[in-house]
Image (cartoon, rainbow, N blue to C red):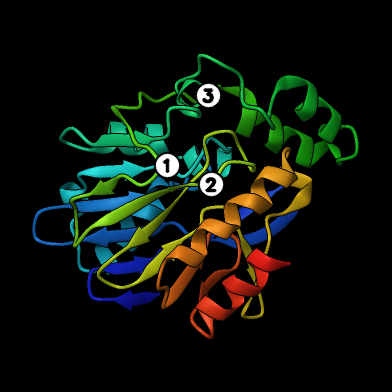
């Protein structure tokens, strides 16, 4: 979905644990940079490439990938993207999640014990799909770590907002030019309504709720939730209510 000039969401269908949903990576670009925020689950390179081209941008002009955090539905297709590119793509993430993305530490939520427990309740066919999905550990080098309040001088300016809780190194992004907040999983949305992070997937809910308060420091026209999509109606007011609840 087009948000404004030089910023669009990519809609990818995700099938995990027998459930189908839509996830929303974000593409930001200008004449000098093409940036992808988050990369879907493993195996979605083709869909991502097609969506980038459909936005009128060449996949071969992709210069950077910014990861909001370590979860597999956000970093899943990163190794494929880096391998498919005919040039160097710089990967940016927060220092706290870097060792998980690079494979130095096992994923907080998708460690072997947790995956095994989830498999117990699934039919055999779905078990095999999950085993395939998580069978090979994902690793990709983070070229640059980014920190709270840092303004990335790309595409009219992008401010990094450190929003831990969902993971230790979770970040959100504020795109100045379009007044767009990219929340990663710091928020979710349904039917145009913003909500706090999914408690079942957020190990430190107390910290995650505190992180939401940071959003009220920005003038926000549009919110992009990875799970829930684009929210434009009363964005600032909705964020203020969440921050004070």
In this image, 76 relative to 88: left or right? right
- Could you tell me residue 185's position as x and y percent? 58, 52
Q: Which residue is mark 1?
A: 67
Q: Residue at x 18, y 57 (%)?
A: 58
Q: Are marks 3 and 1 in contact (CB under 8 Å)?
A: no
Whether residue 11 appears in this view of the structure is no
Measure the C-alpha gap from mark 3 to mark 1. Answer: 12 Å
How far apart in space, not on screen, are marks 3 and 2 (Cα)? 17 Å
Residue named by callout 2: 163
In front: label 3 or label 2: 2
Q: Quadrant of residue 113?
A: top right
Is label 3 in a helix, a strand or a loop? helix
Residue 84 vs residue 29, the one in the foreground: 29
Q: Residue at horizontal 36%, vertical 47%?
A: 149
Instruction: Count all numbered tags in the image, as a single digit.
Output: 3
Q: Between 223 and 107, which is closer to the camera in this rendering? A: 223
The tag earlier along the polypeptide, 3 or 1, is 1
């Amino acid at each position: 979905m087009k948000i404004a000039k030089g910023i669009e969401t990519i809609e990818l269908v995700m099938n995990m644990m027998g459930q189908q949903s839509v996830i929303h990576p974000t593409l930001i670009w200008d004449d000098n940079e093409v940036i992808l925020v988050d990369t879907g689950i493993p195996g979605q390179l083709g869909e991502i490439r097609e969506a980038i081209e459909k936005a009128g941008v060449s996949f071969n002009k992709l210069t950077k990938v910014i990861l909001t955090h370590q979860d597999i539905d956000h970093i899943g297709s990163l190794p494929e993207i880096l391998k498919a590119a005919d040039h160097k793509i710089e990967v940016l993430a927060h220092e706290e999640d870097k060792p998980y993305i690079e494979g130095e530490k096992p994923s907080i939520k998708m460690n072997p014990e947790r995956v095994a427990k989830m498999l117990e309740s699934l039919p055999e066919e779905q078990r095999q799909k999950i085993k395939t999905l998580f069978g090979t550990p994902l690793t990709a080098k983070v070229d640059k770590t980014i920190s709270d309040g840092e303004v990335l001088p790309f595409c009219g300016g992008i401010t990094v907002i450190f929003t831990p809780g969902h993971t230790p190194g979770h970040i959100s992004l504020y795109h100045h030019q379009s007044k767009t907040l990219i929340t990663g999983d710091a928020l979710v949305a349904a039917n145009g309504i913003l909500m706090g992070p999914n408690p079942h997937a957020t190990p430190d809910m107390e910290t995650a709720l505190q992180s939401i308060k940071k959003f009220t420091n920005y003038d926000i026209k549009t919110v992009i939730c990875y799970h829930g999509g684009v929210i434009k109606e009363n964005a600032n007011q909705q964020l203020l209510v969440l921050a004070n609840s």
